[in-house]
Amino acid sequence: MGLFSRLPQASQPKSYVTVGLNRTVLLVGLGNPGKEYDQTRHNIGFACIDDFVTKNSDMSGWVAKKDLKCVMSTGQLGQSRVIAIKPTTFMNLSGDAVQAVANFYKIALDNIVVVHDEIDINFGQVRLRMGGSDAGHNGIKSVTSTLGEGYGRVRIGIGPKKPAQIDSADFVLQKFTKKELDEMPALTREVSAILSEYAYGLELPTETRSFLL
């Protein structure tokens, strides 16, 4: 049984046979570069994409791509070519890297999924959708400004803010609590599974998955 509750999904075999041989997907984890940002709430996108690459042996190690403003891992899952990136710009300029990679590899907008933190969702929930507004997230705002809204989102809850009066910019740069860090492997494992399903050919559903705290 998965660690997240979810809505019923269509059987996988039917989805797999529809994947084209030339399908390329781009998986993006958002965060800020630098050791000082490790284990901060704003970097949960980096943590999840790291876990995805580690868990899939067909993905390469991370390689710096200075001209594309990111570090990159590539591989093949099923019949899909997979490109995973972590922008080396800071969060507010994430769109520069995503646009550069998407243009270079000619990746369609609906074959891009961005993994990022969401302050208005409680820790332990993951919401999936295609398209939508940036909800005040500066990294998503940057990506949308360069690509448009039609890409996929894996929105990972990091809220609620505690204390409630803390400035949001300060809250997202805080480290996760020990309890949250203890629960992080289960969370990143589930997100890795979501990304793997998508890479193998399943559509990104619109749903909320709740971690059983």
Image (spheres, rainbow, N blue to C red):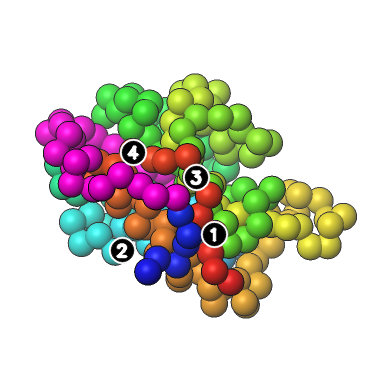
Q: Amino acid at mark 2?
A: Thr
Q: Which residue is under mark 2?
A: 54
Decide which of tag 1 and tag 4 comes sooner along the chain: 4
Residue 133 found in image quarter: top right
Residue pictured at 46% horizontal, 25% vertical:
150
Mark 2 and mark 3: Cα distance apart in space: 25 Å
- Check whether the beta carbons of the residues at disc 1 and disc 4 lie within 8 A of each other: no
Residue 105 found in image quarter: top left
Mark 2 and mark 1: Cα distance apart in space: 23 Å
Picture coordinates of residue 186 (x, y %)? 45, 69
Tell me the crowding category of disc 4: few under 14, some 14 to 19, or many 20 or more residues within 10 angstroms, Cα based: some
Tell me the crowding category of disc 1: few under 14, some 14 to 19, or many 20 or more residues within 10 angstroms, Cα based: some
Disc 4 secondary structure class:
loop
Picture coordinates of residue 201 (x, y %)? 25, 41
What segment is highlighted magenta in the picture? 7-30
Q: Which residue is under mark 1?
A: 210
Of labels 2 and 1, the one closer to you: 1
Q: Which residue is under mark 3?
A: 207
Tell me the crowding category of disc 3: few under 14, some 14 to 19, or many 20 or more residues within 10 angstroms, Cα based: few
Q: Which residue is under mark 4?
A: 203
138 w.r.t. 59: above or below: above
